[in-house]
C-alpha cells in the first residue's frame, strides 16, 4: 500500500477527512494575502485559509495494480509473441466502468498468475492498437492465444464472464 501526503491548512481535521477530492473551488479576493479554497462536503464545506496552521493528509489506500500496462511499443513482445495466453483490457482514463473492470482484471491477474498474462492498454494514448482490433467503445477485454485473438468481452460484466472466457482459452 503506497502512502503519499499533502500539506493543507484546514479549519478542522474532520473536514479534511470528509473533503470530496474532485470538487474543489477557489475564491480570490482583492487582498493578495487572502486566498480561500473550498471543498464541498455533504454537510457544509471545508475551507482552506492562507495563514491557518498546516496539517498533513495521508492517502489511506492506493490501488496497487496487478495487471501490467502494455503500449504499442511493447505490444508485439508482450501480447503477440507471448508463450502464455494473454488478457488485455482496453480502457480510457476518463471511463468510469473501466475502473470497475480494472479491479476485476487485477483479481484475475493474481488468481491466474503464471497461467495467463494480464495487461491493460489505454486507448487514448495507444489508439493505433485499439484501431487494429476495431475497439469503438471501452471497456473491452480481448483474450489472445499464440498471438491470435480468441475471445472478447465487451462492456462491464461480472467476473464470471471473464473467468469463463479464460477457461475456454486454457482448454483450447
Image (spheres, rainbow, N blue to C red):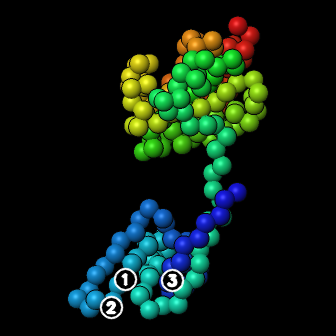
**Residue 36, numbered label:** 1
Quarter occupied by residue 78:
top right
Give the Cα separation between the discs numbered 1 and 2: 10 Å
Would you name the residue on which mark 3 appears? 10
Image location of residue 169, percent across then percent down: 68, 14
Residue 40 appears in the figure: yes
Label pair 3/2, CB-CB below 8 angstroms: no
Tell whether 97 sits left or right of 61.
Answer: left
Q: Relative to residue 11, is residue 16 depicted above or below? A: above
Under circle 3, the secondary element is: loop
Give the Cα separation between the discs numbered 3 and 2: 17 Å
Q: Local crowd at mark 2 within 10 Å, few (<14), some, or many (≥20)?
A: few
Measuring 40% from the left and 76% from the top, which residue is drawn there? 38
Give the Cα separation between the discs numbered 1 and 3: 10 Å
Q: Local crowd at mark 3 within 10 Å, few (<14), some, or many (≥20)?
A: many
Between disc 1 and disc 3, whose residue precedes?
A: 3
For the N terminus, the image quarter is bottom right
Of residues 38 and 2, which is closer to you in this image? 2
Measuring 41% from the left and 37% from the top, which residue is drawn there? 125
Of residues 8 and 75, which is closer to you in this image? 75
Between disc 3 and disc 2, whose residue precedes?
A: 3
Measuring 64% from the left and 19% from the top, which residue is drawn there? 82
Would you name the residue on which mark 2 appears? 33
Quarter occupied by residue 136:
top left
Under circle 1, the secondary element is: strand
Tag in front: 3 or 2: 2
Amino acid at each position: 500500500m503506497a502512502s503519499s501526503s499533502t500539506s493543507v491548512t484546514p479549519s478542522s481535521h474532520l473536514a479534511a477527512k470528509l473533503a470530496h477530492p474532485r470538487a474543489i473551488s477557489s475564491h480570490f479576493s482583492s487582498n493578495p494575502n487572502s486566498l480561500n479554497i473550498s471543498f464541498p462536503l455533504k454537510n457544509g464545506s471545508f475551507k482552506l485559509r492562507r495563514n491557518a496552521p498546516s496539517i498533513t493528509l495521508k492517502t489511506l489506500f492506493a490501488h496497487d495494480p496487478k495487471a501490467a500496462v502494455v503500449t504499442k511499443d511493447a505490444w508485439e513482445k508482450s501480447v503477440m509473441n507471448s508463450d502464455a495466453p494473454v488478457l488485455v483490457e482496453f480502457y480510457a482514463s476518463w471511463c468510469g466502468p473501466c475502473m470497475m473492470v480494472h479491479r476485476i482484471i487485477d483479481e484475475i491477474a493474481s488468481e491466474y498468475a503464471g497461467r495467463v498474462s494480464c495487461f491493460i492498454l489505454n486507448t487514448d494514448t495507444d489508439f493505433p492498437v485499439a484501431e487494429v482490433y476495431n475497439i469503438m467503445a471501452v471497456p473491452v477485454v480481448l483474450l489472445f492465444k499464440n498471438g491470435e485473438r480468441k475471445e472478447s468481452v465487451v462492456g462491464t460484466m461480472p467476473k464470471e464472464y471473464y473467468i469463463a472466457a479464460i477457461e475456454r482459452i486454457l482448454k483450447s
